[in-house]
Image (cartoon, coloured by chain):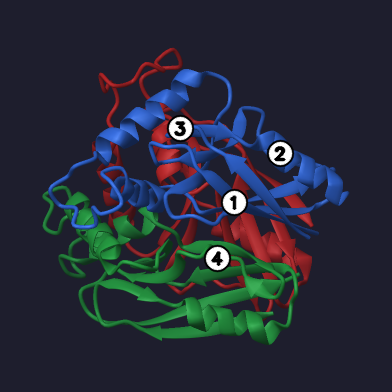
Chain colours: A blue, B red, C green
Amino acid sequence: MVEELIVETQGQGLLDITHQVKKIVDISGNDHGLCTVFVTHTSASLTIQENADPSARRDLENWLNRLVPENDALYTHTTEGPDDMPAHIKAILTSTSLSIPIINGKLGLGVWQGLYLWEHRRMGHRRRLLVHVSR
Amino acid sequence: MVEELIVETQGQGLLDITHQVKKIVDISGNDHGLCTVFVTHTSASLTIQENADPSARRDLENWLNRLVPENDALYTHTTEGPDDMPAHIKAILTSTSLSIPIINGKLGLGVWQGLYLWEHRRMGHRRRLLVHVSR
Amino acid sequence: MVEELIVETQGQGLLDITHQVKKIVDISGNDHGLCTVFVTHTSASLTIQENADPSARRDLENWLNRLVPENDALYTHTTEGPDDMPAHIKAILTSTSLSIPIINGKLGLGVWQGLYLWEHRRMGHRRRLLVHVSR
């Protein structure tokens, strides 16, 4: 079973998609299995992170922005804007696919884990994800 | 098939879990298939690395500690200790899930590959992993 | 179904393996499913990146080479050459396994996504990948 998940982002940031993915797992009716989430873009990515304190996610984002700043003299791929090349680099440092076991009919995330779509472009985008569920 | 794997860490470091995961693959009896390992925490992660010379793993750890130091003025998420925010960042730069094909009844790791649980906190923790095996 | 894929690299760089992996998915005849690619080495890795403008891939490589330079005084694992330890670090920052859903008989990559084997050593190597395809 492969479901398409469309997520509208609001610009750079971590967007919680845990609920949407859990719903797809619920519909599958699988008691045990594997859920794989895949993002079909190269300037947005996935990460699993703490879902409790929002300051952790803000720090993640600020840290990554400092590691991969815009307007770095190294970049030659600049025609799509100053935030495009940093977005590609951030995408390779995080995840394009993530697989989470399903246990007792539920997505096997830890208590403090949330699943996030990470938009790396400044502008909001319509992002298309694929969610595969198997036994 | 989803199995729970509990690993007690001894503080920051790479812990070889290859043997435990191989045992689960053996029990499954699958000749060909896929084994997915998932860590249910946001301050520990997974990596596949050289299993021969321990100096490679020490260098990995020292390099990552230098890239993501404690007490960085950027951090605002500091209530859980100086090693907490660096642990979250290290987790997103490495892997929360890893999938390894099973071939001829064996985990398809290369000769020099080991599977490691990477504890990023200074103190030892009881870490819960999920291991999914399918055809 | 697990297939072995041998790729001869020509030294450091991103090598497009999308076509080879698509062929394996075609042969499987699966309409919907999951394709997992795994690299059996610790000094080469996988990434999904923009397949249009080659300047994006050159920038990725130059950026990663600057972040993880050779001859860093921190390295103690130096017996296999100055490019070996950087290769291990680059491998942990990118991906050893990647899972891509199959939708309507096709690998579900986005229009601008290509699947790349990233050789991190200076010399060309014979790299062995495993490709698992399931429903």
* Callout 2–callout 4 Cβ contact below 8 Å: no
Q: Of the residues under marks 3 and 1, which one precedes in the sequence? A: 3
| Among the 4 quarters of the image, the one containing residue C119 | bottom left
Which residue carries the number 4 mark?
Answer: C109
Q: Residues within 10 Å of mark 4 (few under 14, many from 20)?
A: many
- What percent of the width, then of the height, locates residue A31? 86, 49
Would you place residue A59 above or below residue B62 in this image?
A: above
Distance in Å between CA atoms under marks 3 and 1: 16 Å
Q: Are the residues flagged by discs 4 and 3 in contact, CB closer than 8 Å?
A: no
Q: CA distance from mark 2 to mark 3?
A: 18 Å
Subunit ID for the residue under disc 3:
A
Whether residue A113 is visible, yes or no, is yes
Dot label at residue A20: 2
Instruction: Please give the chain letter of the residue carrying mark 2.
Output: A
- Viewer-proximal residue, A57 or B35? A57
Q: Image quadrant for the N terminus of chain A?
A: bottom right
Labels 1 & 2 near each other (Cβ < 8 A): no
Q: Could you tell whether C82 is left or right of B14 in the image?
A: left
Residue A114 is situated, as x and y percent measured from the top left of the image, at: 61, 33
What number is the disc on residue A128? 1
Mark 4 → mark 3, Cα distance in angstroms: 23 Å
